[in-house]
Image (cartoon, coloured by chain):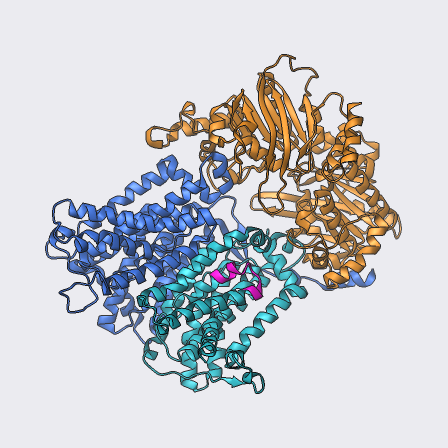
Amino acid sequence: MASLHASQIIWVTLRLGNDVPLLAIEGLTKSFGALVAVGGVDLSIAEGSIHALLGENGAGKSTLVKMLYGTLQPDAGRILIRGKPTVVASPNEARAQGIGMVFQHFSLFESMSVAENIALALDHKPTPDEVKAELDDFVERYGLSVDPDATVGDLDVGVRQRVEILRVLLQKPSLVILDEPTSVLTPQEAESLFGVLRQLASEGKSILYISHKLDEVRALCDDATVMRHGKVVARTDPRKESSASLARAMVGSDVSEVSRKAGSVPADAPLVFELNQVKYDPGTLFGMSLKNISMRVHSGEILGIAGVAGNGQKELFDVLSGEALVDLDAVRMDGHPVGSHPISRRRQRGAAFVPEERAGHASVPAMALSENALITRKAPEDGTLGSLGVMKFSAIQKLSSMIRDAFDVRSAKGDPAASTLSGGNLQKFVVGRELSRDPKILVVNQPTWGVDAAAASFIRGAVMELAEKGSAVIVISQDLDELLQISDKIAVLSHGHLSEPLDAANVTLEQLGLLMGVDPTANTSEAAVVERSDAA
Amino acid sequence: MLLEGILVTIVGAATPIVLAAIGELVAERSGVLNLGVEGMMIMGAVVAFGVALTTGNPYLGVIAGGLAGIAMSLLFGFFTVYLASNQVATGLALTLLGLGLAGLIGESFVGTPGVRLEAITIPALSAIPFIGPALFDRDILVYLSFTIVAGVSYTMFKTRIGLILRATGENAEAAHALGRDVRLIRMGAVAFGGLCAGLGGAYLSLVLTAQWTEGMSAGRGWIALAIVVFATWLPWRALAGAYLFGGVIILQLHAQAFGIRVPPQAMTMLPYIATIVALVLLSRNQAVMRRNTPAALGRAFVPDR
Amino acid sequence: MQLELFKRDAPSGKMLVAAPFMALGLTVLTSGVMFAVMGFNPVAALYEYFIAPLTELWSVYELLLKAGPLILIALGLAVCYRANIWNIGAEGQFTMGAIFGSIPPILFPEWTSWTTLPTMLILGMVGGALYGGIPAFLKVKFRANEILTSLMLAYIALLILDYLVRGPWRDPGGFNFPESRNFSDEQSLATLEGSRLHFGILIAFAAVPVMWFFMSRTLAGHAFKVVGEAPRAARFAGFSSKTLTYAALMFSGALAGLAGIMEVAGPIGELRPTISPGYGFTAIIVAFLGRLNPWGIMFAGLLLALSFLGGEAAQITLGLSDKMARVVQGMLLFFVLGCDTLVRYQIRLTPNPKATPVATASEATDAA
């Protein structure tokens, strides 16, 4: 895993004769203010190869590919396409050079049709109707079926990604960049994506595959470049590495992960939280309504809710937290009906909540950490408020620094704005704010999404510790590995339906994947088959 | 005869609102909320009046009115699009500045009879009973208002430029990621809005009254803004909405002719009340509303550097 | 070359203070140029605008008299704008406050006890609050945009006032002039000996520290800021956006209404078709120039009052149009908003990336 210098790459390339790499980058650098996001990165991708770009959240992968695609301009270094130095001034130019990009957060237009979305990305300026004709060929060749007239906002995440991929394929690229493509897919969907990518590689197209998931990189890629803190730390053939060795290269140290012991919940643990046949229609554009959801969570138990994004996670969280109100009896805490009680009253009963979006929902980005602490810590026992709601600044500051110390929140000195913290540190602050209340019930949505490995491991540990102290915990997550690691039971949310909970110790990825991919409303017989096979 | 007369006056009352609304509709479809319509309109009115008066040529007045609207909108666009300033507040600033500037420029025009933009009669069509005189014996701005609405509707939904415009208003980040110059597109849309508002203003001072009075836009720019919402950002519905408004304004004038005794202030109030009622009625239509509202409306876009 | 914004890591504290002054400087500069273009000596004109009104005591009183309503209204608007609620109909709430507050002196002219004036002030606040409550109701209940409804209501309020003073409330002994009867001493605010300055101005200035404390030291003030910055976080915190919408609009309405009744029970002394030189709209500028901060609003209110007086002074001494004052005010708001960008961004001119060798790019395509 020795790293190579640019000169060495060129030398190696020369020695191999006319085997010029499709793409080579030399010393590419990009800074944002004081932060060096990408610092002198070299990389080369051979024609027809699948090249992995590995790295944690915040390692600089996305910044790097944005420069390749022309949405950012490098401060230094150069990009060579088939050996020619090239300035990629804009995405249009990237496409003209044969570079296509599948974005992590899809760059789709929700209220427009599939055909319109695709037409927008094509530089030969077809009308949406002409796109439909072009589509057929690709749909057939790669088995990526999609209705060109459907409105994108109505589509499942997996289908949306298909739209993104088709959009790139119609550009007839020689290099396809995919940024964390499987983070929103079921295992089965991911497997079929790999099939498409292998087919593309066999047709001579190169693929730059950005991920932090080691198993899939080992299964799919020919080469790997590992980045950490904006620098290349290793180049390797991932098929010859173990997940552990890749992880060490990526994180820079061994990450210790604690797993939940099976059967750690006593059989007679009291029921703390229940949902009884909740029906809820968010009434928003492209929202998912919840259909008859029931769940029971006992003291000391962690219930994982798996599912692909957009299947009702946001809505379920709102119902659990009281940001959306339902029938009084539909939600019970400690036996008390609270379904129509707003979030503050549920907090008074000892519940705590961590929403998915840390900036803007869990916190106010422009406000100081202390002001953000106050958002959920204004109950009398927090001691943050005097009479007539006058804020006690010293108490608020003390609370805020207690949270920052206890949860290892790294930030600028003083009382910085939430927006200045990295994703992982802000998430630790938000989680810490809730956990330091010693809640009896914790509901957390995507606890480690977009968070670096060390912070993620810390957060998972803290959540498990809370359960050990006897709290009931509900974790909604797209990350199946995470759920398998920390949950006692896992239920799957799909199209607004929640499956029966399965024992986390015995369930397999495939079983969960099948439940995630099924639409219980669309095809009841298929769902029934899956459920029966699970029961068996 | 009365009905024919009513139709003629409705077109007159509606045309400036149609023009201002269709321009604002395009700007909003690109994601920019320009609350300065009133300011652009009144500047269009005073500049059109002044140029027509000094040159004696009302057509030069029309062009100058449109250019004045564009100039005002570019000022707004520079601040909101390139400096990412708050769109709501900057729009208010544009209105305040426009009203002040127009008052200043127009001070010497007060009481001066202006130059009227004459009608261009379309031979056969103008002879059609009822709608003939109302629609085909009019000045160029009336014809232009229909042409622009048709053109915008076609461009927005049938052409690539329209597709890109809508995409920018829906998700500016994604449009940028695809390589579209979001800020240039928005500047263009804002300038089009300025042009139309300026033409609407020109209609006020060259056709509707052919004189200059301070504050003669009388909230029409704001009503145009409400019409855009009322029309759920659809061009032909904006035209229909403006004509509905024209109808309300004219019917209250004719109400007195029918001997209905109401204080004149209540009559003057009618368009403002109608605007509020229109916004309230719209709430029954949340589904349509959500589908068509440009999702990025009012949010500044600053590309990462 | 292209103008580009570079996001700062954190808002610049220096710029936070400097931006309003930069805006003021740009306004003075631009208006100086405009004066010169219009054929006036820019130095003389600027002196008349910004300095002359401060050189005589009576005109300082007038300054305070004009600053009072501006500050009072802007303090209320700042609460709305913090909460991202765009009340631009303060002129209407001001008018409605004046109308409600004038009920005792006009309909019950014989009632002249010491309770009359306080009743009038309270009624003024009630009138303004109720009128501000209408756009709140329409927003909460029907999701109607408060920008448009509050402004439409302002037009309507002005017409209601016009109707009242020309119709039912016209002074029977007033020779058919569109005016109400004059308020008696018990129905008016006491004035400072020999000036029009009344003690209501003290209320406006006293409101500044109160509002500062409320907005920066209480949970309720915090709630307005949270809902304005991040509405989802406000919901998560348990703040009701409906309650906050009503509270912000009715509170700012009450302050505008108070300013309205104080204007008619003070310097004007009766109801007329026109009772405001556009205080409700100018207060929007005051709120932004003061960065929505009560202390800033106090200074901004004084400055904008100065521009009103300066406009009058320049008209008398130089023959400069009084319309110029509104142009200066409009420019000031523009520059304030533009300079605000510097708080969050650095502005740089950058070369266009396409200016660098494009030839290599096209060569590469040829080779392919």
| B247 over A54 or under it: above or below | below
**Image location of residue A306, percent across then percent down:** 68, 31
Q: Report whether B127 appears left or right of A10.
A: left
Which image quarter: residue B215?
bottom left
Is the stretch drawn in magenta largely helix, strand or loop? helix
| Residue at horizontal 40 percent and vertical 60 percent from the top | B273
- Chain B drawn in what color? cyan
Q: Judging from the image, what is the letter of the chain drawn in orange?
A: A
Residue A20 seen in this snapshot: no
Residue C222 seen in this snapshot: yes
Q: Dividing the image into 4 quarters, which one contains the N terminus of chain A? A: top right
**Nearer to us in this view, C221 or B294:** B294
Q: Judging from the image, what is the letter of the chain drawn in blue?
A: C
Q: Report whether A30 appears left or right of B275.
A: right
Q: Report whether A230 appears left or right of C65.
A: right
Magenta span covers which residues?
B226-237
